[in-house]
Image: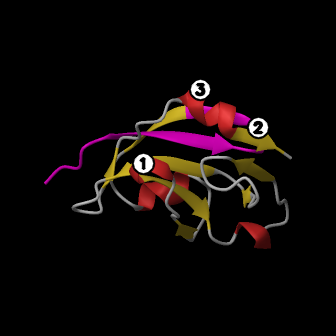
Amino acid sequence: MEKEEVRAILIDPYKEEVKEVTYNGVYTEIYKLIDCTCFTAPSLTNGESIYCDDEGLLKDEVVPFITKLYSPNHPLVGKCLIMGTDMETGDSISTTLTVKEVESSIMWH
């Protein structure tokens, strides 16, 4: 069965850039999108998840940022990917957030 493409939002603190990307539905693509070998996906508001490098603090260059969508007091590091989550199946689905909403929630360090 072919996976459905998912609209996602990529946060790149190295470039201080937020942009829309397409996720192909294959979880290994997340590693490529956020440049990592191990990721975690904490929940955001309204069934959204943010996929983050689980080993981001161990890298040579640590670039943190804060997003109010996650926690105003807990920085994230490295590239992150926001997608929706189907609450019945756990599958990734297109995010309901816009690039503008995500941009306005971020404080770069």
- In this view, the mark in front (3 or 1): 1
* Cα gap from disc 3 to disc 1, whole angstroms: 17 Å
Residue type at mark 1: give it. Answer: Asn
Q: Position of residue 64 (x, y in %)?
A: 79, 54
Residue 100's label in the rendered image is: 3
* Label 1 element class: helix
Which stretch appears magenta? 1-19
Real-space Cα distance between discs 2 and 3? 16 Å
Indicate which disc, 2 or 3, sits on the residue closer to the N terminus: 2
List the residue tagged with mark 2: 15
Q: Are marks 2 and 3 in contact (CB under 8 Å)?
A: no
**Where residue 30 appears, x then y in whole percent?**
48, 56
**Relative to residue 55, is residue 10 depicted above or below?**
above
Rendered position, 100 above or below 67: above
Quadrant hosting residue 6: top left
Q: Is residue 18 magenta?
A: yes
| 55 on left or right of 63 | left
Q: Which residue reaches farthest left?
A: 1
Q: Are marks 3 and 1 in contact (CB under 8 Å)?
A: no
Q: Quadrant of residue 13?
A: top right
68 versus 74 height, above or below: above
Task: Name the side, left or right, on which 71 lies relative to 31.
Answer: right
Q: Is residue 79 left or right of residue 96?
A: right
> Where residue 109 sits: x, y (%)?
86, 47
Q: Earlier in the sequence, mark 3 or mark 1?
A: 1
Q: Residue at horizontal 81%, vertical 54%?
A: 63
